[in-house]
């Protein structure tokens, strides 16, 4: 019996990236994906010990125990293991984490860098394989630990000053303040050098793409497009210092049939800009707090915003600190309370100057000029002084406050009293104001403008505990964890949804399972598995109730 040939393993963080690389490798290679971090700081507690030099406490990411076990089994059988996570500080940190988890020698030539996902670049990357760059990995960890420590401590203060669940981080505090103080009217000229920030500004100006959509599609163009007999990325890593084409000869019209409408528009913009077909663009700002004005304000302050802006805006909207109407952001009453609570205490540590200083120091860590412990300790001590001063104003007996009860527009169908919006163990719900005489209660559903892809009626949103949200139809049994988008499918007109992954680009898809665009779509497998698990839980609960 022939002995089984041991395979070399290539580990990446994204299934899309893995799918592209599998087209480049032979039978002696196996390409595995982590789906983002396998271990991370805990969400429910601080995870950073300020009594032990700010040491982190990493735990296995919720729901990844099975994946982690499978990856360990596969790597144990590997002849060699190569780590091809993204070519930046975050990717280097994940590569180092993989070394620790899978027992890879970080001093070995295990790290390969893929600035572009092409067959030629993949093959040549093995010739330049190197050990783990600990300084670069430390740079990411420096920022990660500072951000986690700050957001958790701020949450401790704001839950006593306002109520439970109110928190904000370094960038989001700065962003909220900018929205409250509308940047002055000015014009912004986008430079010819194409970075992720200039690409987002260009796409906003010329395609009316949000920052989030641009990042999402740029990641797709990097992670690989399948052609007739080949697969390749069209642009270099978009989160690097500068974006390039992987081949200027690959004209947009030549690959249009393989791209979605949005992919084609963005690639056409990138191709034209890089090949000098477009002159520098000028964004005309009207003084309102919209994306263009905020991007210009951050550029003027010298703040590196490209990788955090879209996530920051989404978080502020989700937490109801700001509201968006016709592309203009306005601070809500809750957002104003957050700003007032921070004012006078955290001005220095949350300023653009302080943010830029940390960014510069993180860079120094990445090139080995400064130790991560020095940067973390210096900033966190300065922040802790401001935190202590703010907490002192609340008094020694200050306790976390509960969010005030809000009266809804609905009337109890059992007794005619008003229904109240309350928050419980399983999320937000409606309860009769006549409790305990009337114990009527039901889920609180927020009606949306988007339509159900199954029956065409309005969709509704329900917020659960731990920040989770699901979406359902008001009339039929349609339900999903994926967020419905304002855009509709170009093919069938149904609502588009976005499926978010941990640590990588989200996936956009049509909600109509019979749409031609869903044929052989990777979301089919994900949704089928989600449905299977839901049915298994339902059957298990039914069995337990009978016992």
Image: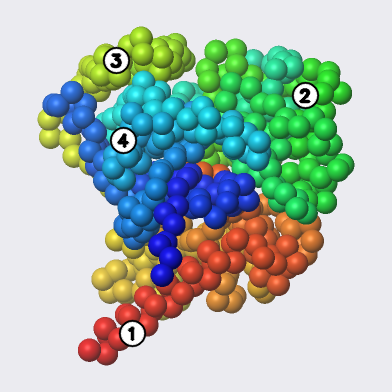
Instruction: Give the labeled residue for mark 3.
Output: 371
Residue 494 placement (x, y as % from top left): 72, 63
Q: Label 3's element?
A: loop
Picture residue at 25% right of the left edge, 19% below the top: 373
Mark 2 neighbour class, 10 Å CA radius: few under 14, some 14 to 19, many 20 or more = some
Of pointers 1 and 4, the one earlier in the residue sequence: 4
Is label 2 or label 4 in front? 4
Of pointers 1 and 3, the one earlier in the residue sequence: 3
Is label 1 or label 4 in front? 4
Is label 1 or label 3 in front? 3
Query: Label 2 to label 4, Cα distance in Å?
Result: 40 Å
Residue 426 placement (x, y as % from top left): 34, 63
Query: Label 4 to label 3, Cα distance in Å?
Result: 22 Å
From the viewer's perspective, is 332 left or right of 370? right
Is label 4 or label 3 in front? 4
Q: Quadrant of the N terminus?
A: bottom left
Tell me the quarter of the picture where residue 388 sits: top left
- For the image shown, how many numbered marks are present on the structure? 4
Query: Label 1 to label 3, Cα distance in Å?
Result: 56 Å
Picture residue at 53% right of the left edge, 40% below the top: 314
Picture residue at 14% right of the left edge, 26% below the top: 52
Residue 259 placement (x, y as % from top left): 76, 49
Instruction: Give the labeled residue for mark 1.
Output: 542
The label number, if any, that marks residue 230 in the structure image: none
Instruction: Give the labeled residue for mark 4.
Output: 105
Tell me the quarter of the picture where residue 305 sits: top right
């Amino acid at each position: 019996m022939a002995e089984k040939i041991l395979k070399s393993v290539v580990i990446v963080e994204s299934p899309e990236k893995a799918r592209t690389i599998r087209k480049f490798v032979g039978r002696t290679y196996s390409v595995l994906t982590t789906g983002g971090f396998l271990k991370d700081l805990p969400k429910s507690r601080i995870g950073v010990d300020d009594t032990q030099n700010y040491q982190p406490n990493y735990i296995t990411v919720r729901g990844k125990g099975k994946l982690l076990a499978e990856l360990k089994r596969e790597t144990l059988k590997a002849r060699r293991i190569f780590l091809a996570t993204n070519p930046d500080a975050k990717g280097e940190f994940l590569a180092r984490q993989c070394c620790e988890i899978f027992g890879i020698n970080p001093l070995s030539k295990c790290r390969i860098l893929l600035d572009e996902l092409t067959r030629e670049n993949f093959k040549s990357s093995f010739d330049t394989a190197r050990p783990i760059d600990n300084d670069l990995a430390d740079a990411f960890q420096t920022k990660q630990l500072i951000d986690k420590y700050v957001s958790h401590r701020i949450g401790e203060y704001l839950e006593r000053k306002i109520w439970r669940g109110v928190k904000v981080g370094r960038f989001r505090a700065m962003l909220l303040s900018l929205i409250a103080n509308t940047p002055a009217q000015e014009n912004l000229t986008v430079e010819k050098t194409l970075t992720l920030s200039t690409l987002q500004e260009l796409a906003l100006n010329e395609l009316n793409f949000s920052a989030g959509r641009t990042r999402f599609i740029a990641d797709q163009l990097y992670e690989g497009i399948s052609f007739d007999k080949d697969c390749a990325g069209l642009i270099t890593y978009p989160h690097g210092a500068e974006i390039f084409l992987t081949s200027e000869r690959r004209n947009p019209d030549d690959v249009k049939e393989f791209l979605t409408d949005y992919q084609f528009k963005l690639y056409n913009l990138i191709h034209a800009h890089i090949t000098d077909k477009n002159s520098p663009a000028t964004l005309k700002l009207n003084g309102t707090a919209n994306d263009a004005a905020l991007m210009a304000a951050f550029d003027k302050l010298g703040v590196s915003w490209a990788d955090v802006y879209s996530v920051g805006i989404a978080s502020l909207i989700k937490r109801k600190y700001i509201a968006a109407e016709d592309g203009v952001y306005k601070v809500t009453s809750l957002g104003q309370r957050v700003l007032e609570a921070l004012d006078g205490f955290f001005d220095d540590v949350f300023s653009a100057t302080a943010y830029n200083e940390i960014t510069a120091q993180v860079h120094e860590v990445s090139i080995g000029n400064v130790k991560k412990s020095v940067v973390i300790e210096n900033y966190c001590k300065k922040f802790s002084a401001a935190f202590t001063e703010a907490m002192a104003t609340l008094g020694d007996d200050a306790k976390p406050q509960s969010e005030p009860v809000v009266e809804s527009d609905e009337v109890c169908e059992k007794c005619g009293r008003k229904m109240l919006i309350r928050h419980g163990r399983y999320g937000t719900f409606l309860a009769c104001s006549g409790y305990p005489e009337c114990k009527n209660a039901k889920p609180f559903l927020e009606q949306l403008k988007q339509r159900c892809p199954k029956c065409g009626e309005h969709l509704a949103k329900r917020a659960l505990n731990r920040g989770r949200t699901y979406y359902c139809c008001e009339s039929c049994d349609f339900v999903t964890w994926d967020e419905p988008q304002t855009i509709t499918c170009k093919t069938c007109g149904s609502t588009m949804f976005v499926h978010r992954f941990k640590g990588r680009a989200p996936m956009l898809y049509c909600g109509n399972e019979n749409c031609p665009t869903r044929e052989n779509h990777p979301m089919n497998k994900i949704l089928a598995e989600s449905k299977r698990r839901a049915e298994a839980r339902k059957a298990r609960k039914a069995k337990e109730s009978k016992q």
